[in-house]
Image (spheres, rainbow, N blue to C red):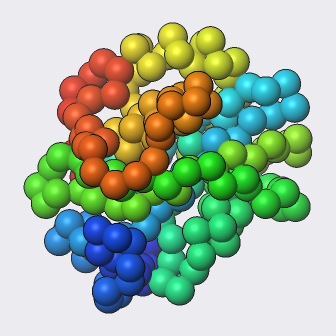
Amino acid sequence: MSSADEILDVVDAADRVVGQAPRGEAYARGLRHRCVFIQAKDAQGRVFVHRRTPGKLVFPSLYDMFVGGVVGAGESYGEAALREAEEELGVSGLPAPEPLFKFLYEGGGSPRQSWWSYVYEVRCELPVRPQAEEVAWHAFLPEEELERRIGEWTWVPDGLAAYERLKAFRSGGSAGGAGGSGGGGTRGRGGTAERA
């Protein structure tokens, strides 16, 4: 089964399940669904950063400071967070990612991009072997370097929205909730990212 055939729960503005659809159809029709974003840090506190492969269904070849992905039909956010973190990092035996906050991402594009996004964090002290079909390049970067790279590299817009909210959350501000656009345009330099 290809990733486009994976069945997702379709949800409403309150994150209640209202139906199901294959992933490819959810993207093509702009159906709201669920995603998880996991910030993985190594023992030194550096953040796992990667560039997505060109064959990705969504945001190909862009940089991301989260691992994660869609929540499958009937799957909890927590189950999806652990599954996605282990799959994308290429490890097994991670501790359960810690849930931080949830927000409704609404990006641009046609059709409109919209998904409930739960942000987690996890410490990964295991040697990583990222999936070659998901990750074209990776490194653990200190926070200061990550901040510098935001202005230099083109980032996935939903991850950038999650990262900005994560910074606000860690500084004691508001991070979650519905509403508020997550962007949908550029991350750093390099033009607009549209849903593929």
Q: Is residue 57 visible?
A: no
The image shows residue 33 at horizontal and vertical percentages of 36, 70
As drawn, 102 above or below 182: below
The image shows residue 178 at horizontal and vertical percentages of 34, 55
Q: Is residue 146 visible?
A: yes
User: What residue lies at 88% left-to-right and 45% top-to-bottom?
Assistant: 126
| Closer to us: 24 or 34 | 34
User: What residue lies at 26% left-to-right and 38% top-to-bottom?
Assistant: 183
Question: Which picture quadrant has residue 81?
Answer: bottom right
Q: How many marks?
A: 0
As drawn, 53 above or below 42: below
Horizontal side of residue 6 vs 185, given as left or right: right
| Closer to us: 79 or 171 | 171
As drawn, 181 above or below 12: above
Question: Which picture quadrant has residue 116?
Answer: bottom left
The image shows residue 163 at horizontal and vertical percentages of 49, 34
The image shows residue 71 at horizontal and vertical percentages of 51, 71
User: What residue lies at 60% left-to-right and 13% top-to-bottom?
Assistant: 145
As drawn, 158 above or below 167: below
User: What residue lies at 51% left-to-right and 31% top-to-bottom?
Assistant: 173
The single residue placed furthest to the left in the displayed view is 110
**Quadrant location, the C terminus:** bottom left
